Image: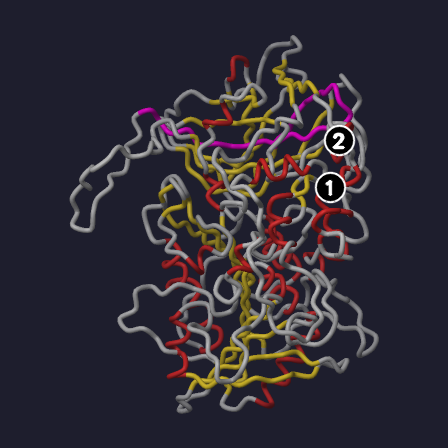
Amino acid sequence: MRLRIALLFIVLSTALAPQAWPQAKPAEEFNVREHYTKYEYRIPMRDGVHLFTAVYVPKDASVAYPFLVNRTPYSVAPYGEDHYPSRVGPSEAFARSGYIFVDQDVRGRYMSEGKFVEMRPHIDEKHSKQDVDDSSDFYDTIEWLLHNVPNNNGKVGIWGISYPGFFTSASIIDSHPALKAASPQAPMTDLFMGDDAYHGGAFMLNANFGFYVFFKPLENPTLPPNLPPFEYGTPSGYDFFLKLGPLANITARYFHDQGFLWNDQVGHTTYDDYWKPRNLAPHLKNIHCAVLTVGGWFDAEDLSGPFKVFRSIEQNDPGIYNGLVEGPWVHGGWSRFEGDHLGSASFAAKTAEYFRDNIQFPFFEKHLKGKGTEELPKAYAFETGTNVWRKYPSWPPPNAKSRVLYFQEHGGLSFVAPESQQEAFDEYVSDPARPVPYIDYAATHVPQEYMVSDQRFASTRPDVLVYQTPPLEQDVTIAGPISPHLFVSTTGTDSDFVVKIVDVYPPDYPQPETKTESGTPPRQTDIPPPRIVLAGYQQLLRGWPMRAKFRNSFEKPEPMVPGQVEGVNFTAPDINHTFRRNHRIMIQVQSTWFPLIDRNPQTFVNIPDAKPEDFKKATQRVYRGKGNASGVTVQVLE
């Protein structure tokens, strides 16, 4: 949600604040103070609340400029008209081109007045000036800017990443006539249904804890506090959370003085009337500007949001340009990194720089300045595996066809359905006291590399089922959502089922060479640590949990009947990946993924209230006979 790892707050003014992005080796370092004049305003809203807004105006007044706005809950620091950030806008190209940059503390955060509401629900029908939301706040902001900031060209754009991505989406509903372009990037859209809070009904423990120990209610207006790093007392998040025990212990120890935010996230365990109004997708209507939604295939926080925003606008707002960009990036990585690789996964090009220079910048230049005539495609998607940018007229691509990867005996995986009439299954014992880790190294925060991390450590555990194809005889490209269809039984009354799709590299996969700046191999002066061998590497492409109590409804959970075979069907966010010839497609199935998600006691209880004695071992069976053929539906390009 909002760069939910605590790192966001440690580097609050540089990680996701409006000015945050790296320089792409400029010929000369750009000096914001030299080229822009800073002003600070308290812009009045229709209900009398004032929102703190920093405005950076180009000193060159020979031409009129468009506004480019970023609305954030993370502070528009540095405060004071004599204090300048080192960077403004989405990338340096914008600063050099010339825009009136506008950074605003949203309602209830830092120097703005009013009350902050987590993902403030949109009000479709407003009956008075007291009916305010982010759409009305942005409308009032635009109106004020147009009349009070001179030398503007009458056009407005807005962009934002993560929580600011949500504020971008929420702000463009019932859009102001001057709004011409918007780019929601990694936008939080539905926290319970696949964004930061819950995946498949399972609470995203590690990331939410790391976020909410810092993101707390404010007595605003106030300047950002100087917060020290949270002390875990151990380098291992696995050990930290396991020793804490049930969720109730975490809440009592670290969030006892917080009336909402963490408690709301943890306490609302079903898709109830807290979550439903906060699903922004149904409200994305009456949008009249061009929209470019951006996401990362390996975003650990807001994988679902970009697709939901794109699809909702496509359905509700015909007649505007509505595009989707998905690249091989972590959360916000397209703004902060080069995008050449992620951990051990190589993409063979600086994909983030390409996006900033060839997609994002031309989009705003076209719609806010009238420069350029070429429209971007409907979907601009980076295909991992082959490492190629693809342009599609729709997403998923029109030539993507549904096929099922069926689980077979002896750990096989095939597009051919099993023929055996006998009841066939594989089983394992899931123990909440010894959960499967999601990484094989020590980390307290969620390492963004985990989205492509090597799964060989998991595939050797007895509580992880593994199914894989023979080496592929030809490339197989999957472009679209991943939909497991499991037939399972358990000796408990509730269980989680985590399904991962993995690319298994061939045994002769080349190892990248390490060279010094002079191009020569480094001289070995001591015994080096073990290196990651890419031959046989099991690269995670997508992993997604499903809490079985929600198999029929996320609103009304139901216990599992011990020993009874039931279907557990769900859908994980899209991938766009080519499994190359001689690689294998692997599916892993397990019932714990800790501490990425909270532990399921495997008894039917309200998990935030679970006691230590509620956590029990359970034997899980996954069936693969002809009558109960478990598998995963994927979209294969033809």
Q: Distance between the Cα atoms at labels 2 and 1?
A: 10 Å
Name which residue lies at 67% across and 48% down.
Answer: 197
**Residue 581 shows which numbered tag?**
none
Secondary structure at badge 2 equals: helix
Please report contact status of discs 2 and 1: CB closer than 8 Å, yes or no. Answer: no
Residue 341 lies, with reference to residue 416, above or below; the image says below
Residue 473 lies, with reference to residue 34, above or below; the image says above
Which one is in front, 529 or 139?
529
Is-magenta flag for residue 502? yes
Q: Quadrant of the N terminus?
A: bottom right
Residue 322 lies, with reference to residue 480, above or below; the image says below
Which one is in front, 421 or 230?
230
The type of colouring in the image is: secondary structure
Secondary structure at badge 1 equals: helix
Q: Local crowd at mark 2 within 10 Å, few (<14), some, or many (≥20)?
A: few
Q: On the image, numbered disc 1 is attached to which residue?
A: 249
Name which residue lies at 52% across and 55% down.
Answer: 7
How far across and how far down the image is residue 566, in percent? Answer: 74, 23
Name which residue lies at 59% across and 75% down.
Answer: 104
How far across and how far down the image is residue 581, in percent? Answer: 36, 29
Task: Identify the magenta region.
Answer: 484-507
Indicate left or right for 69 with 626 as reference: left
Q: On the image, numbered disc 2 is attached to which residue?
A: 612
Which one is in front, 295 or 522?
522
Asked where in the image residue 353 lies, by quadrant, the reply is bottom left
Residue type pointed to by label 2: Pro
Residue type pointed to by label 1: Asn
Which one is in front, 570 or 148?
148
